[in-house]
Image (spheres, rainbow, N blue to C red):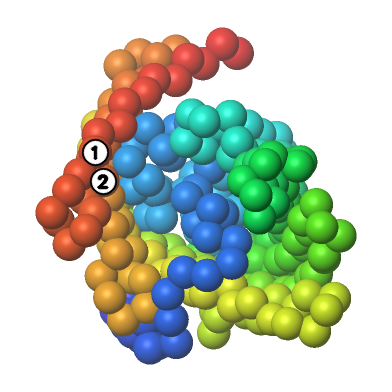
């Protein structure tokens, strides 16, 4: 009965989140996700969320960790050496709580051109967020978590601004094999205010996923669906196979543009300690 109640809560949360969402705005690069493991699985990680990157995929996942972990990432977003995405974070447990703290940064740069078409300098936009996370067990069958995010942005013209965002995540275990996950990112489209008085919308992105675990969790199959406003966003399908204790193989596919296009992901993890 508890599982039915919590699963129903997850469904209500998804529907409410979709009603509140209104598309992607400022800080959209932060919605791409982090971590070689999760990205190798095609981003199908909302219902898995069992490592230090859970802070951004589903904060509820921090409640299933039992130790202290550090994680980090730095990547060139499009291979053009003009857009970067970095993250560093730490998670730990205290009593019945999972706690996380992270810093995320995205930047984009391009030439600054005057009215005559002459390059006169470089224009750069930098977006950053400090993220605090908290998660706990609920009714012994589910985990709930939340993020509080302080956003900061600046550009090379001297403009700067700040704002707050909030995430809410839920994980529900349906027996030993199935897990349902929900993550509502930037609930109710947070507002970001520039020093000059203008505002930007940090639009919500809402994810729902299912994970299936086999062979004592050595094989994980997962799928996520994104809701961008009231529209269906990307669909993610991923797999992880723990070949031996020291080696895991991963792959995934991401379906975009209403299933009209797709791309594949692949990766591996090596356990050295």
Q: Quadrant of the C terminus?
A: top right
Q: Nearer the viewer, residue 104 or 137?
A: 104
- The image position of residue 140, as x and y in percent, is 48, 67
Image-based side of 13 in relation to 77, left or right = left
Callout 2: helix, strand or loop?
strand
Callout 1: helix, strand or loop?
strand
- Mark number displayed over residue 263: 1
Q: Which residue is mark 2?
A: 254
The quadrant where residue 197 appears:
bottom right
- The image position of residue 204, as x and y in percent, is 49, 74
Examine the rendering and report whether any part of residue 19 can be seen.
yes
Image-based side of 55 in relation to 244, left or right = right
Q: Nearer the viewer, residue 97 or 247?
A: 247
Q: Residues within 10 Å of mark 1 (few under 14, many from 20)?
A: few
Measuring 65% from the left and 49% from the top, which residue is drawn there? Answer: 116
Q: Residues within 10 Å of mark 2 (few under 14, many from 20)?
A: many
Label 1 near label 2: C-beta < 8 Å? yes
- The image position of residue 234, as x and y in percent, is 28, 58
């Amino acid at each position: 009965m508890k599982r039915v109640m919590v699963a129903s809560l997850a469904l209500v949360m998804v529907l409410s989140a979709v009603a509140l969402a209104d598309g992607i705005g400022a800080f959209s690069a932060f919605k791409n996700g982090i971590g070689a493991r999760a990205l190798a699985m095609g981003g199908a990680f909302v219902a898995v969320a069992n490592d230090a990157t859970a802070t951004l995929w589903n904060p509820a996942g921090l409640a299933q960790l039992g130790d202290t972990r550090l994680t980090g990432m730095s990547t060139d977003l499009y291979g053009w050496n003009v857009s970067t995405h970095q993250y560093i974070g730490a998670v730990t447990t205290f009593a019945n709580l999972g706690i996380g703290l992270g810093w995320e940064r995205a930047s984009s740069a391009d030439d600054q051109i005057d009215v005559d078409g002459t390059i006169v300098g470089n224009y750069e936009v930098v977006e950053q967020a400090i993220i605090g996370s908290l998660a706990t067990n609920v009714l012994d069958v589910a985990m709930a978590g939340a993020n509080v995010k302080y956003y900061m942005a600046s550009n090379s013209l001297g403009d700067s601004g700040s704002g707050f965002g909030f995430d809410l995540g839920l994980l529900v275990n349906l027996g030993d094999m199935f897990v349902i996950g929900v993550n509502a990112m930037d609930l109710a489209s947070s507002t970001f205010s520039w020093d000059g008085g203008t505002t930007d919308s940090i639009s919500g992105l809402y994810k729902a996923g299912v994970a299936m675990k086999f062979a004592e969790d050595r094989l994980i199959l997962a799928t996520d669906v994104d809701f961008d406003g009231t529209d269906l966003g990307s669909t993610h399908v991923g797999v992880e196979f723990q070949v031996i204790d020291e080696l895991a193989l991963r792959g995934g596919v991401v379906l975009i543009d209403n299933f009209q296009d797709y791309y594949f992901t692949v990766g591996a993890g090596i356990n050295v300690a």
